[in-house]
Each structure stands twice: as structure tokens, then as C-alpha cells.
Image: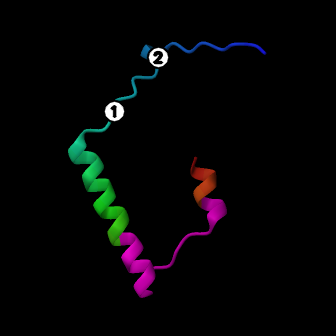
Amino acid sequence: MKQITVDQEKYNIEEPTKAQLITELKEAIQELKAIEQGTKQARPLTDLLNEL
């Protein structure tokens, strides 16, 4: 198997702060509640997987 190395400095990926994570989790929970209540429609699974 061939090993691939990546220059991490090239991509400048910052880790989210604790506050950012909490905000994103709160937004996700609000969106889930809206879907459960029927005020918002869920996206198809294929769309979610294509984002990754």
C-alpha cells in the first residue's frame, strides 16, 4: 500500500472554538425540532452524503 503525505500548512484549517461548536449544535437542534414539528422539510439522505 502506498503512503500519501499532505502538507498541512498548505490548507490552513482552523479548529472551531468551543463557542462555535455550541452555536452549531444549537442550530442543528433547532432545525431538527422544526423538522419534527413539520414546519421544515428534511433533505434527502443523498444530498447530505454528497456534502461530505
Q: Residues within 10 Å of mark 1 (few under 14, many from 20)?
A: few
State if disc 1 and disc 2 touch (CB < 8 Å).
no
Q: Residue at x 38, y 79 (%)?
A: 34
Q: Which residue type does callout 2 highlight?
A: Gln
Q: Residue at x 41, y 72 (%)?
A: 32
Rendered location of residue 36, percent (x, y): 44, 82
Q: Is label 2 in a helix, a strand or a loop? A: helix
Depth check, front residue: 24 or 47: 24
Q: Look at the image and give the residue range highlighted in magenta.
A: 31-47
For label 1, the residue is 15
Rendered location of residue 5, percent (x, y): 60, 12
For label 2, the residue is 8
Side (left or right) of 26 relative to 4:
left
Q: Which residue type does callout 1 highlight?
A: Glu
Q: Quadrant of residue 44?
A: bottom right
The relative height of residue 15 versus residue 39 in the rendered view (above or below) is above
Q: Quadrant of residue 17?
A: top left
- First of labels 2, 1 by sequence position: 2
